[in-house]
Structure formats: structure tokens, C-alpha cells
Image: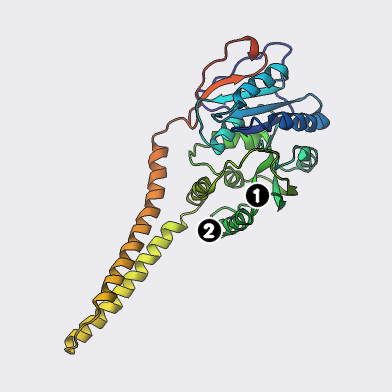
Amino acid sequence: MMQPGLKVQTLSPGTPPATPSISAVVPCYNEEDVLDELLRRLRAACEEVVGDDFEIVLVDDGSRDRTRELLREAQSQDPRIVVVLLSRNHGHQLALTAGLNIARGKRVFVLDADLQDPPELLGPMMARMDEGFDVVYGTRRSRAGETRFKLVTARAFYRLLDRIVDVKIPLDTGDFRLISRRVADILASMPERHRFIRGMTSWIGFPQVAFPYDRDVRFAGETKYPIRKMLVFALDAITGFSVLPLRMATALGFMFAAFAIIYGGFVLISWANGAVIAGWTSLALLVLLLGGVQLIMVGVLGEYVGRLYMQSKERPLFVIDEVLRAPADVRTPDRMAADG
């Protein structure tokens, strides 16, 4: 189900089938060092499972290296490749959403370009889906090449998220998964701007099953999630699936109000008995503590309000500059925008 306003080129005879068995969707950002190996392994994995009945949807998220040039070249040589060029860098989750909008397959295989998630697992994941599941999501047993800091923080984040969100989101699970057509359609139609797709997939429901695997070391390049982006991503996950931070603000408000009532009673009794109230230092410390807590709670509230404000603008989630799809290499690609 395409987003309203999204235009896709009409295929000519001799091009890949309109509804392939598999669409592999891969967001790409500065991936020039890994693209050749990615396509080699991904093509081999798809061919082993469904022959030529597949498409590979590569979404360039405003790369600054030679990724776009290499994607154009790859698409011109293989009609099974679909290239989606976004107008600028929109972020991994929105790039993935753009790919889901364009993908036409009966099943959609989602993975990152860095080859930490092995494409060769497509076959076993297809077998699990054949048992009647709509989502087969990869669960990481191990994560080769990751720093201890990344491992500890990721483990802590997923367990914290599990405790506070309203939807059961599997632990140690990324976006690496195989999803059915109906799940892909629902994901593409969901209007959230601040997206946490692994959580959104869980929210949709339908039969889902874990697929344990060992994550490989990054083939090339650097992580696209430095600490700053990891923190923003964590905020999107928490604010998108839980109101617990707001409830914590309310609870802290009642707690400090109760403390103020008790302390106020102590002050009145001391004044009635003629005692001198000493302790300007402790009073200043108390004011600073209360002010700090209030500012933190205002910040929490601001995160939710800010997301509501951005969502209320109803701008497109992403803007597609070009879609290169066979026989797009001999025609002028349309300019497109996908409504949010």
C-alpha cells in the first residue's frame, strides 16, 4: 500500500515481475566500501531461495561519498535492483520506511548494508515464515566486533525499554527481519515521524517468532550510530511507546509536595515554640534541588510536546528524488514526494 501522493514508474514488458516473491530492502548511507560485497552476497542468497523472482531495493539516504554513483551503476547492470534516492539525509528509520513504500514483494527482507546481519540467513528465515508467521525477527546471540561500551549500553537499553513500554518489544533485536506483505503495508502506512520500527512491528501484532543468530563484524566503514544518535534513537523509542516518564514527573511532584507539607509543619511548630530556624545553606540546597528536578521534568514534557508539534505539521516523512527501476535507465526518472 503506497503512501498517498507517491508516484512509481510503470514497468515495460521484459522487466522483473510486478510482485516478486522477495523484496530485500537496504538503507544505505556512505556505503561505497561495502556495496559490491553486499550485492554479491545478497543476490546469491536471494537466488538460492527464489531464483530470479526477487528485487533488491537500495535506499540512498543522502550519502556524501560515491554511494549514489555506485548504486546507479549497479541498477543499470541488473534489472532486479531498484534504487531509491532520497532528496537529503532523513535518517535510517525514514530511509527504511521509504524502502518499504517502494518494495513490491510478497515478503520483505530488511537488513543493513554493513553485512553485520548475514544475508545468507534469508533461506532459514523463509522456512520459519512458511510455518505461518508474519514476522521472523533476528535476535542477537552474540555481536562480534562491538566495543564493551556498546554491548553494555545496548543490553541495558533493551531491558530498560522492556520494563517501561506498553508493547512487548523483543530483547536484543534490531531491524533485521523478514516480514509479510501485510505487515510491510501497515508499517509503510503508519504516520509516525519519530520512528522505532522494531517497536512498531511488535505493536502491529500478528504471529511473530524470534530467529537467534550471531551478528558478524562490520565488513567495512564506520558505525552510523554514534553516541548522540543512539541517545536520540533511545528517546524516540521511549517516547513513542511509553508515557512512564510523564507519570514519573507526576509522581515526583506529589512526592516533593508531601515533603513540603511535612517540612512546612516542622517550620510552623519550631516557630510557635520560639526556636530559631537556622540553615540557610540547607535551604539554598533544597531550592537548587527542587529547581533541578523541575527543569528535568519540564524537559521530559518538552520531548513529548516537541514530537507532537513536529507531527502536527504533517510534512512528508521523506522526499524521494528519484526511483531507478528497470527500465528506468533509459527514461527520465520522475520526481516524487511521499506524504506522511
Residue 216 to residue 69: above or below: below
Q: Are marks 1 and 2 in contact (CB under 8 Å)?
A: no
Q: Nearer the viewer, residue 298 or 230?
A: 230
- Which x, y percent locates residue 97? 57, 34
* Drawn side of residue 163 relative to residue 247, left or right: right
- Which x, y percent locates residue 156? 59, 59
Residue linked to disc 1:
173
Disc 1 packing (10 Å; few <14; some 14–19; many ≥20)? some
Residue 208 visible in the current orientation: no
When asked about the image quadrant of residue 47, the answer is top right
- Which x, y percent locates residue 281? 27, 75
Residue linked to disc 2:
164
In space, the residues marked 1 and 2 are separated at their CA atoms by: 17 Å
> What residue is shown at x 30% (from left), y 66% (from top)?
288
Circle 1: residue type: Thr
Residue 323 visible in the current orientation: yes
When asked about the image quadrant of residue 18, the answer is top right
> What residue is shown at x 71% (from left), y 42% (from top)?
117
Disc 2 packing (10 Å; few <14; some 14–19; many ≥20)? some
- Which x, y percent locates residue 35? 68, 30
> What residue is shown at x 60% (from left), y 30% (from top)?
99
Judged from the image, the secondary structure of the residue bearing numbered disc 2 is helix
